[in-house]
Image (cartoon, rainbow, N blue to C red):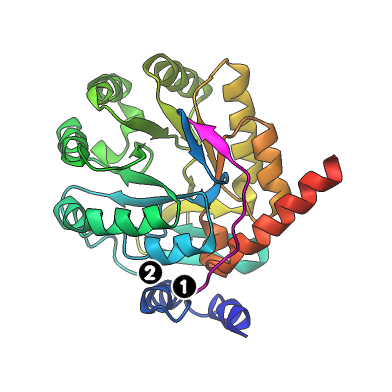
Amino acid sequence: MLTQVIKLINYLPPEFTYETSHALIRSGIVNYRGYEFEMPVEVNGKSIKNPIGLGAGIDKDGFLAPWIARAGIGFITIGSITLKPRPGNPKPRIVKYPGLKAMVNAMGLPSRGFTDFVSRLPGILSKLRRLGAYVIISLAGFSIGEFMYMLNGLRGYDVDAVELNISSPTYRGSWVTDREYLGELLRSVEAFPGVLFVKLPLGVDIEFYRWVVNVAEKRGFGLTIANTLPIKEPGISVGYGGLSGYPIYPIVKSLIVKVRRWGFRNPIIGLGGVFHGRQVVDLLRNGADMVGVVTAFAYEGPFVFNRLFKEVLMGLSERL
């Protein structure tokens, strides 16, 4: 019955869907407990119970994480978190295309800010540890100084990894347009003692990918492949947004394959358009170490994970 309600909600105005689904999860009404799906993977010397998890963008401030992790996922990404509080872009900020299993969003990085998040972080981590989830914190900075301040603020916390979101509009509109400054950022963050992932954008030239992959390889960083695809969208207040969901899956898979062919040996989180277990298996076989979902969660809520677990097991058994 609840799954049918969630499907119905997806055909209501997207902002209403977003706010209603978050309220349901935080209230505990969607007190969903998945079964334990064991498919251990090792990332940077740490064992993760299974490679399926949540990408950044759903739980921006860490209020939903303990409820979502009950679904039995292997990892969860919180954020992206910004240094200062931000309201995000004016509404409407989301357009959904259920028939395409896609959506376009321009949330504008709404965040309660880093200070608020860190004040609650010990409690969040305590709950997630009990559920056995690998915890990734996604940070979005508007300068090197902002990234370094937040990274230094995370020292001493038992965070498994930090994701550097260089692919959302932040520094001068985009970190990607200033390779020299981005290179300085990637040199600076190397001092952080923990595991780092760099979240790549879609829609940039191949030479940028070759350059950033080479830098990440040399400095021991992992990669999150990838963020949304920038497109024009008249239904959103700012006139553009990031396309996510099923249509970008072939691009994401192709990029992961290329990166591995270039000799990249560090961990990769595959992210973008994953709705089915066969896609999870496909990305794992083509070079991803972990696979995240975002848009599928936006459509189905935590119920999506149980379905994916079953489909992955079925897909693996069929190939044996």
Magenta segment range? 32-43
Q: Please indicate, yes or no, whether residue 77 appears anywhere in the rendered image.
A: yes
Camera-side residue of 297 and 233: 297
Residue wearing tag 1: 14
Q: Identify the image quadrant of the N terminus.
A: bottom right
Mark 2 is on which residue type?
Pro
Camera-side residue of 116 and 141: 116
Residue under the image location 40 percent in, 20 percent down: 220
Residue wearing tag 2: 92
Label 2, secondary structure: give it.
loop
Label 1, secondary structure: give it.
helix
Camera-side residue of 97 and 302: 302
Residue under the image location 59 percent in, 31 percent down: 255
Q: Is residue 158 magenta?
A: no
Q: Are marks 2 and 1 in contact (CB under 8 Å)?
A: yes
Residue 298 — which label?
A: none
